Image: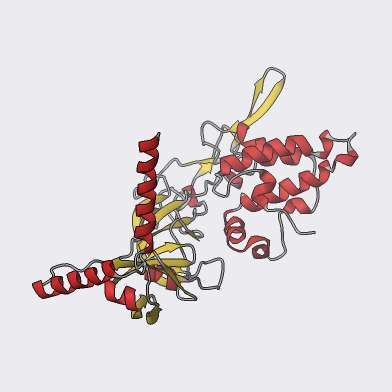
Amino acid sequence: MSKRDYYDVLGVERNASEAELKKSYRRLAMKYHPDRNTNDDSSGAEDKFKEAKEAYEVLNDGQKRAAYDQFGHAGLGGAGGAGAAGAGGFSDIFEDVFGDIFGGGRGGGRGHGGVNRGSDLRYDLELSLEDAVAGTTVKIRVPTRARCGTCSGSGAKKGSKPVTCETCAGHGQVRVQQGFFSIQQACPKCSGKGTVISDPCGTCHGQGRVQESKTLSVKIPPGVDEGDRIRLSGEGEAGEHGGPSGDLYVQVRVKPHTLFQRNNADLICEVPIDVVTASLGGELKIPTLSGRVKLKVPAETQTGKVFRLRGKGARTVHSDKVGDLLCQVSVETPVKLTAEQKEILKHFQRTITESNQEHSPKSKSWLDSVKKVFDDIRFS
């Protein structure tokens, strides 16, 4: 049986934040965990719990989520979330989802040993439509906080090192008694690091990081569109005191094009044609992103007519299929006519008027509608 969409499982939108994911998972975990449904085996609570846990563990992981957003379940290489392996105890859920309430757990930015992961960064990248469709490689310069080279990120002066915190004995956590409950929280002296710096580095002033800019080469895959996001793992800010770096998210913006508008894989352009070509038919050379192509315009073509050129559009990052180019015709009225040209048009108009044929069906239909409106007014 095929798996349900992970976003549908958690009941969130595809752009849901980590906080929204966690809130939804918390609700489902409390509702379906087997420890809370021991007398209701027929409800499938355990299966629903496993499904929610698997969905959360994939979407809460930036790398797995990016692969899932692009390729669906196939992008996970057959390896779903750890929730598929088993339900686990209720303490697992408490630690995964609720532990951050008391400063502990595995979901926060602080890892083992009180090391902080660096912040994620965002970079807005503006591309031309041609580069977005074809793909390209660009160099970007990103301001960030990088690991201090003087102290190698430790924050301590060269020749010294951080010392064990006396308050928490290096654990980074202290227990606080509140009534009947004993809760664990980050050590107030070392802020959960487990160590304190008595002799800080003069370059970074004990932070282990310095402000600088770095140049990165970013490969843009073919077919990216407005709002797409590219994740560069480990290219965000360096973590405090030697902690792991965050990620850099490159947000794509596509500049407006002079000829084309984009609708997913299709391109749309307006094609002006003269009155003679629209009336008698002809052949036009139409620009595309891959060169010019010929478009045959049949006789009696009206403004608004759309011609579809298959395979001349764009593609998306989710498919290798190329879209179509939609050419919308706009019949252009001639301007700056000479006296001779005006006389020719007057003669043409007389021949049209004297003819018994309906040469302007839309005009006749419009005039009939106007006449009907005034007749209704007159007899009402």
Which residue reaches farthest top?
A: 179
59, above or below 299, in the image = above
Question: What is the x, y in percent for residue 21?
Answer: 61, 43
152, above or below 327, in the image = above
Question: What is the x, y in percent for residue 185?
Answer: 60, 32
- 171 relative to 258 in the view: left or right: right
**Image quarter of the C terminus:** top left
Question: What residue is shown at x 9% (from left), y 72% (from top)?
Answer: 339
Q: 338 or 192, which lies in front?
A: 338
Let me know if residue 86 appears in the view. yes
Q: 366 or 45, which lies in front?
A: 366
Q: Quadrant of residue 109?
A: top right
Q: Quadrant of residue 114?
A: top right
- 106 relative to 193 in the view: left or right: right
Question: What residue is shown at x 33% (from left), y 78% (from top)?
Answer: 280
**Image quarter of the N terminus:** bottom right
313, above or below 84, in the image = below
- 51 relative to 186 in the view: left or right: right
Question: What is the x, y in percent for residue 218?
Answer: 42, 67
Question: What is the x, y in percent for residue 180?
Answer: 72, 19
